[in-house]
Amino acid sequence: MKEIKQKDLLGCGVACTAAVLNISYQEALSLFREGKVKVAETGFYCRDIVEALRSAGLNYEYKHIKGVQKMEMHSRGTIVFLRKSNKYPAGHFLSRSENGWMDPWLNYPHKDIQAGFRISLPEEPIYVIFPVS
């Protein structure tokens, strides 16, 4: 998985989808229903990401973290959502790779957005989006 930086303020879910699919941010954005509107106004929910991944031919589901085993959360291709907080006012999506957690805005809140990998999550996730066999 390569690092993909988000190109919009609310585009972390798009960037994580792009990373999982190994496509560009713009290609991933086109998979989302009303993507250009949501990326500018409301952001995305887990169900939006699942729908985009399914439209690309992957079978994914999402769950609240309480009902998920830790192993599922750390599987390659998993995407997690961090709850809204002081650090992440809109929440934040990160995707799991062989290199750790791909963060599409590693240097948040700096305007010069940079993506990169983290060894551990910066905060506790509340949802996980995971591949289903």
Image (cartoon, helix red, strand yellow):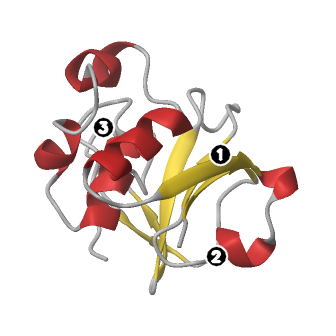
Distance CA(mark 3)–CA(mark 2): 29 Å
- Quarter of the picture containing the N terminus is bottom left
Q: Is residue 87 left or right of residue 55?
A: right
Q: Residues within 10 Å of mark 3 (few under 14, many from 20)?
A: few
Sequence order check, earlier mark of 2 and 1: 2
| Residue that mark 3 sits on | 111
- In the displayed structure, would residue 100 be above or below residue 88? below
- Taking the image as shown, residue 87 lies to the left or right of residue 96, namely right
Q: Is residue 89 visible?
A: yes
Evaluate whether residue 4 shows in this view. no
Q: Give the residue type at disc 2.
A: His
Q: Residues within 10 Å of mark 1 (few under 14, many from 20)?
A: some
Q: Which residue is mark 1?
A: 82
Residue 31: give x, y in percent of width and height. 22, 39
Q: Mark 2 = which residue?
A: 74
At label 3, which amino acid type do we have?
A: Lys
56 or 9, nearer to the observer = 56
